Structures are given as C-alpha cells and as structure tokens.
Image (cartoon, rainbow, N blue to C red):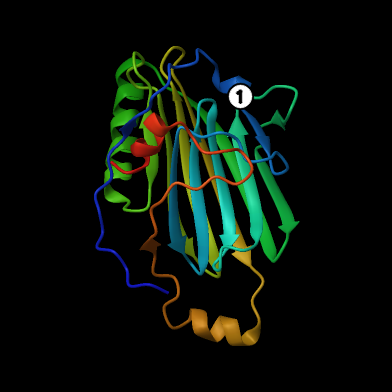
Amino acid sequence: MPESSPPTRREVLDLVAPYRDTRAQDLCWSLSLPVQPALAVRSVRLGGLVLELRLLGASHQVLVWAEEGTELLCVETVACLPGLAGPLPARDLRALSGGGYQWESSTLPLAGPEFDRAVARIRRSVSDNPHSLAGCYPGAPGAITAVLPEAAEAGVRWTTWHSYPQDGRLVRTRSGYRRTLSPRQRGADDHGNDIGEGVDGVRSYGAGPPPVAVVSRHRP
C-alpha cells in the first residue's frame, strides 16, 4: 500500500451542471444499476478497500472495490431515476460478493434558518473529512450532495446528505460494507489496516469518461 498522503481539508465543489428541481421523495435506491456518468469522481483507500465516490447530476453512486481494484463488490446508487430503481427503504441488509452491506435512510423536514444551519454543518463535516466528496449546484444555494466515508471494522461505512432547499428537506443515508475475513486477515486488520489513504483520480467503469471540463472538478 502506498504511503498515506497528508490529510487535506475538503471543500464543496461547484458542479458544472444546473440544479434539477427534484424532490426528496423522488430519490430512488438500487444495488443493481450500472455505473452512471458522473460530474465528479474521487477514489479513496479505506479499511482495506477502495471506495469510488461519484456525484451524479441526479445524486450519487458509491462503488466498493477490492483493494487490488480488480473486483467490484458493491454499487450503491441513490438518484432520481424513476422506473429504474425503487424508493428509498428505511433499512436494508444484503449479502454481497465477499461480504455484507447494510443501509438506512431518513428524511428530515427543516424550515428556514434550521435548514440553513443544517447545510452549514454538512459543509463543516465535509471540510473535516479528508476522504469526502461534495458538490453544490449553481443557482441553488443550499442544494448539496455530500458523501463522507470512513473506515469501519473489517470494512467501510459512509454517510450521504442530499439537501432540497425548495421544500426544506434533508435526506440522510448511512451505508456500510463489511468484508468476510479469514482468521489471518482479521489478525492483519488488528494492526492498522483501517488507516485511510487518498488515491485521488478520475476513473470510469462502463459509463465512459466524464467531459474534460468536469474531470478537473474532482480535485478541489
């Protein structure tokens, strides 16, 4: 594993895309959709896995890869894609290749100043998490999509936020992928494999590369 990069304070990117006037209840969830074209992409190594964080025009995808980058273990899609995916479940638990996945979601109704304070807290969380990826949309103050990953026992977990200022709704999701470890691997994990490393770079698997103007947005 390459030497860790020094921690970097992250900023919320200005995404090169107009804000879609969607609603929190339009969000869908899937573990079976293919990789979607992205506005910004970031890869980080955490907990012995590689996470590919992708901000879409319609929300986000998180791809979980085996550390060697040769096996795709999980593709989580949360986006406004009616007809392609189902509504957000409150909770879910799945057995996936090489491990298990868990999910929970909630929608918070917030009015006026309370909504603004919540968005400000999300921005601070992004700044404090060196592995995060977040973007806002031009012409829509307070409309943010943020993915904040962290190492977890035998794997990774991530929290995402999707804010909808037009109707004061904040969608929070919490997900995790836990590897099925051999006894030898469990022993190795006890000696520090949960330290995260940045491996920034734009990659695309099956969706084609993002436009050149967007590629530059993956690194603030």
Relative image position of residue 142 (x, y in whole percent)? 35, 22
Q: In the figure, 54 relative to 112: above or below?
A: below
Relative image position of residue 85 (x, y in whole percent)? 72, 31
Residue at the image point whose x is 74% and y is 28% from the top? 84
Quarter of the image with the N terminus is bottom left
Amino acid residing under circle 1: Cys
Residue 127 found in image quarter: top left
Residue that label 1 marks: 80
Please name whichever residue, 100 or 139, is drawn nearer the observer in this view of the structure. 139
Could you tell me which secondary element the residue under label 1 belongs to?
A: loop
Residue at the image point whose x is 58% and y is 38% from the top? 208
Residue at the image point whose x is 38% and y is 22% from the top? 137
Relative image position of residue 8 (x, y in whole percent)? 25, 53
How crowded pointer 1 is (Cα within 10 Å; few <14, some 14-19, many 20+) is rated as: many
Residue at the image point whose x is 24% and y is 49% from the top? 9
Residue 87 found in image quarter: top right
Please name whichever residue, 13 or 99, is drawn nearer the observer in this view of the structure. 13
Quarter of the image with the C terminus is top left
Please name whichever residue, 110 or 187, is drawn nearer the observer in this view of the structure. 187
